[in-house]
Amino acid sequence: MPLWNDYKAEAKARGALAHELYVVQSTPVASPEDVRAILPEHLAYQAEQEAAGRLFLAGPMSDETGEQMKGVGLIIYRADSLEDARALAENDPMHTKGARAFTLRRWLINEGSLSLSVQLSKQHVALD
């Protein structure tokens, strides 16, 4: 099994983007009421990270059926290292106050596409 940096170098060598981001899966460990009570602080923290350019994407995920919300969230950070990303996740009020636990993984973006449409006069933004 190749080491992470070796794999990243191989991906770049074959022409892939090889852009590294950090993925946090945040899972509730406290009651829904406790999680909701911390939500304003969590959202303020997320807004701070976004303003600082450290938050790429974040939001809730459904369960495996695609029908129910069980409180699992996905957060993708831009950071200089895994340690920096871990610090961002650890400092989220949801995690510092024990309402959620998290896992952290590196994510190497190699393929795909992204379309963004911005219509200023309509105040409309679409991400496809």
Image (cartoon, helix red, strand yellow):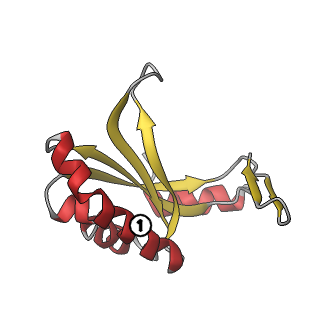
**Residue 101 can be seen in this image:** no
Q: How far from the left and from the top, in percent, is residue 9?
A: 59, 63
Q: Kindly state the secondary structure of the residue where label 1 is placed.
A: helix
- Classify the position of the C terminus by image quarter: top right
Q: In the figure, residue 69 lies in which quadrant?
A: top left
Q: Quadrant of the N terminus?
A: top left
- Residue 29: give x, y in percent of width and height: 16, 43
The number of numbered discs placed on residues in the rendered structure image is 1
Residue at (55, 55) in percent of width and height: 108
Q: Nearer the viewer, residue 126 or 57?
A: 126
Front residue (pair 106, 43): 43
Relative placement, left or right, of 114 versus 71 is right
Establish if 5 lies above or below 73.
below
- Residue 24, given in percent of the width and then of the height, sits at 37, 54
Q: Is residue 6 left or right of residue 1?
A: right
Residue at the image point whose x is 79% and y is 52% from the top? 115
Q: Residue furthest bottom?
A: 52
Residue sitting farthest toward the front: 122
Instruction: Locate residue 56: give its quadrant.
Output: bottom right
Q: Please indicate, yes or no, whether residue 46 appears anywhere in the rendered image.
A: yes
Q: Is residue 120 above or below residue 71?
A: below
Q: Is residue 6 above or below residue 126?
A: below
Q: Residues within 10 Å of mark 1 (few under 14, many from 20)?
A: many
Residue sitting at x 77%, y 56%: 124
Query: x and y percent of residue 38 in the render?
Result: 23, 58
Amino acid type, mark 1 = Gln
Q: In the drawing, does residue 17 fall left or right of residue 53?
A: right
Q: Residue at x 17, y 52 (%)?
A: 99
Find disc 1 in the rendering and name its residue. Answer: 46
Q: Nearer the viewer, residue 13 or 68?
A: 68
40 on left or right of 50: left
